Amino acid sequence: MTYSAAIKKIQRNYLPSDFNVSDWNGLEPHFKELLDRDISTKEKLEQWLKDQSELEAVVSEDACWRQIKMTCDTQNKDLEESFNYFCLQIQPNIQPYADALNKKLLQAPALKELDNKKYFTYLRNVKKSIELFREENIPLQAELAVLQQQYGQITGAMTVEVNGEVYTLQQAGKFLESQDRKLRESVYQKIQKRRLEDKEKLNELFDKLVAIRNTESKNAGFEDYRDYRFKELGRFDYTQKDCFQFHEAVKLHVLPLVNEIYKKKKAALGLDQLRPWDLEAQPEGVTPLHPFTTGDDLLMKTIDCFNKLNPFFADCLSKMKELQHLDLESRQGKAPGGYNCPLAESGAPFIFMNAAGQMHDVTTMVHEGGHAVHSFLAHHLELSGFKEYPMEIAEVASMSMELFSMDYWESFFDNEEDLNRAKEHQLERVITIFPWIATIDKFQHWVYQHPSHTHEERADAWKTIVNEFKDDVIDYGGLELYRANSWQRQLHLFEVPFYYIEYGIAQLGAIGMWMQFKKDKNSAINNYCNALSLGGTTTLPELYTSAGLTFDFSPEKIKVLMEFVKSEMNKFPE
């Protein structure tokens, strides 16, 4: 099957073509009309669903642009106010209508005439939303939406001075690749100390978030926020018990490989002690990898890389470039992190990241590029709700792209030695990220099962969990204060709670996709595109099956996949 990036904005058939979301008064008549409309026949019901989907797409895209603009410039108060206005004045008014429309749908006599296979996952999500909806949670959710963005404002303002120049923390990270070990340590210390300056501010913000989330879950009749959030995230296909099995499997089958990687790093650097500021360094005489210069250079090289992999993938990024749907370089006042934001009406998504000229920026770019391809592939689906795919498949899209694209990274490197170093770095990252994923996930379970904990109890719990997944090689002596506070650098804890184990589940899926790719590139890419083009129209296990995978993150499966990655790493020259 051939796919096209010639994406088009959804044609409006329900709303006026010049309609813009400005205030609730302009929006409410459309929700009222949908609520009052006759949907007594199958034809009327399906048209009603299409019109509701169009309205959802317009509102969603407006909200997304407000967030995108604010994260691109966290110091602009007008952009912050615009985002907050939506969260506090528009979204809370939509929610009761959304609940009423959901109930109207499930009570419609013509519902039984709809194709059960086509609408199964859509209706399952509608039922879930009805079960979770509580009027008293509307103001809490509005407050959460505003508070969560404060993390980006606080961390986006963090800078350090190195050699007389001011850098964002992302930009300063390039000095950790220096061959000057004293400089590496100095910059590491500066970054950690700068984070500590806002330690209490972030602790207090997290306290508020935990308390509100706990109240939200109690209002909905749940024992704790963890159970509420599992339901809200639509985790129909695995349980908390599966998460705990994943944690144990990481200790059993991944940590030994992590130890091997760090022992090799320690030996290559000729060090008696491997310290945290040594992890990105190169042996003497080996210059750090510099795969690109500017954000534009990164984009053009990624387009070239994708074109060699599959021209459709390159066309997606080229279309986004044409539409100016990218903001790639790190700068002061920009929120941290990276994301691909689907735009429900326009179709072509927006990529946001903080590139600073390092190898991991290439990984981020191809990762978000994978998400972007997913957005393109799912845009054709009839309803906005059909495009709400599970995060566990969304991250397979991005992480598989990291691995698929490696064979074409000569777009970033002039010689084979650098190319091999880059690939080895990527595979090391594939393995070393697992303990951190398990740590963050297990910490969240603790936090929301102990919602009234103190700062000291939280720090103690974090230290205990961090030590559970600690390697045996890196020397953290004297860095205990930094370690106790290191959870604050994970934005997911603040902005998207419990969204992290998806990376682990999906990394396993991505390794499975890569195994396919190694055997038959075209078949693997066809499976990849086929699964992603289904959006959320089928269950998570079925999406994995469409990709030629099995939805399985058992210890036995993890063991097999880790052995495969290790065998691939062993192919690199010493």
Image (cartoon, rainbow, N blue to C red):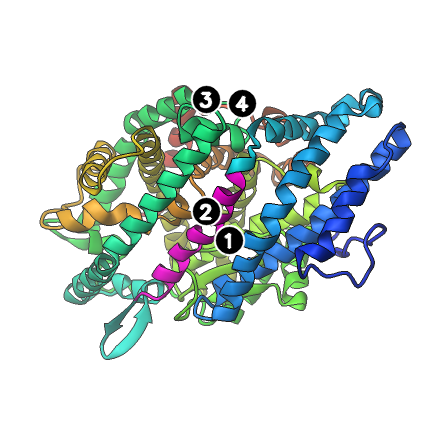
Question: Closer to us: mark 2 or mark 3?
Answer: 2
For residue 459, which quarter of the picture? top left
Amino acid type, callout 3? Thr
Side (left or right) of 536 relative to 371:
right
Q: Looking at the image, is mark 4 or mark 2 earlier in the sequence?
A: 2
Q: Nearer the viewer, residue 436 or 558?
A: 436
> Could you say where residue 414 lies in the image, as x and y percent from the top left?
45, 65
- What residue is shown with label 4? 237
Q: Residue at x 47, y 72 (%)?
A: 294
Instruction: Indicate whether 165 appears above or below 407.
Output: below
Residue found 62% across the figure and 37% down from its top: 389
| Amino acid type, label 1 | Tyr
In-image side of 228 versus 64 (left or right)? left
> x%, y% of residue 258?
28, 38
Which kind of residue does numbered mark 2 sit on?
Leu
Q: Residues within 10 Å of mark 2 (few under 14, many from 20)?
A: some
Q: Is residue 2 left or right of residue 83?
A: right
User: Which quadrant would residue 333 be assigned to in this image?
Assistant: bottom left
